[in-house]
Image (cartoon, helix red, strand yellow):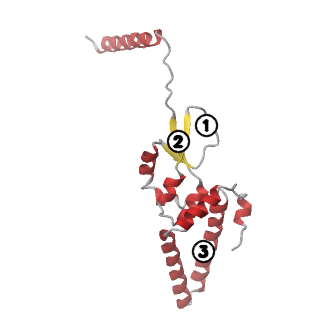
């Protein structure tokens, strides 16, 4: 049998199968919903900013500033102070408003699959602005927060923040200590 005839037989067979499949009743849509994990960025940011991991990062920044000060390196010291100030502004925007937590997410990268599995979700996103009825939103905030091993005091602050509306982003950025 030539190649052309074999291809023709395969195509005709596939068309016959497709026609048979569509000839019956339409397939019924499943009642199973797609589960998407969502989280409160403010809570995750606060948990991270009050974590031992962040304390270590701050200690390193302070040590670098102390070294620059001891070395008389004014340019490096100014650069580090600027970095610290920008970090503080970012922290305010993340904890009090809805600023992205892109600098924190890499620290959760390894634990995200386990969080998704525990919550039985196919994706984790900050929020869904809209979804249809085929989607079930599952709050995974607490599971993400736990990755930073928060203290009881941190948990209480997170509960207060979650119970309030986010501040306007510009207002949060302009907060002073």
Label 1 SS? loop
Give whichever of discs 1 and 3 has the lower sequence position: 3
Q: Which element type, helix, strand or loop, lies under badge 3?
A: helix
Disc 2 crowd rating (10 Å Cα; few below 14, some 14-19, many 20+) is many
Q: Is residue 38 above or below residue 94?
A: above
Q: Position of residue 98 (x, y in %)?
A: 65, 56
Examine the image and state in which quarter residue 10 appears.
top left
Q: Residue at x 73, y 57 (%)?
A: 168
> What residue is disc 2 on?
36
- Is the C terminus in the top left, top right, bottom left or bottom right quadrant? bottom right
Specify whether residue 139 is in view.
yes
User: Which residue in the structure is indicated by mark 3?
Assistant: 84
Mark nearer the viewer, 2 or 3 = 2
Answer yes or no: do the residues labelled 2 and 1 have beta carbons within 8 Å? yes
Left or right: 140 in relation to 14: right
Left of 149 or right of it: where is 131?
Answer: right
Q: Nearer the viewer, residue 22 or 175?
A: 175
Residue 149 placement (x, y as % from top left): 47, 63
Q: SS at mark 2? A: strand
Q: Residues within 10 Å of mark 1 (few under 14, many from 20)?
A: few
Please tell me the numbered disc located at residue 131. Answer: 1
Please state, as top left, top right, bottom left or bottom right, where the N terminus lies in the image: top left
* Residue 60, disc: none
Residue 79 shown left or right of residue 51 in the figure: right
Residue in the picture at 45% in, 50% down:
115
Gap between marks 2 and 3 measured at Cα: 35 Å
Q: CA distance from mark 2 to mark 1?
A: 10 Å
Select label 1 or label 3 by which is in front.
1
Looking at the image, is 11 positioned above or below residue 92? above
């Amino acid at each position: 049998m030539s190649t052309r005839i074999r291809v023709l037989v395969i195509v005709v067979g596939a068309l016959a199968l497709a026609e048979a499949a569509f000839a019956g009743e339409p397939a019924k849509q499943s009642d199973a919903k797609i589960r998407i994990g969502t989280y409160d960025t403010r809570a995750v940011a606060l948990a991270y900013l009050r974590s031992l991991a962040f304390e270590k990062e701050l200690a390193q920044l302070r040590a670098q500033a102390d070294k620059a000060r001891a070395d008389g390196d004014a340019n490096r010291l100014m650069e580090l102070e600027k970095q610290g100030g920008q970090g503080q502004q970012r922290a305010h925007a993340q904890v009090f408003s809805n600023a992205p937590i892109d600098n924190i997410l890499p620290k959760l990268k390894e634990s995200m699959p386990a969080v998704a599995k525990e919550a039985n979700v196919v994706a984790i996103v900050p929020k869904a602005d809209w979804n249809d009825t085929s989607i079930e939103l599952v709050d995974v905030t607490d599971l993400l927060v736990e990755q930073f091993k928060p203290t009881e005091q941190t948990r209480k602050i997170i509960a207060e923040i979650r119970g309030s509306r986010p501040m306007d982003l510009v207002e949060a950025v302009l907060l002073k200590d």
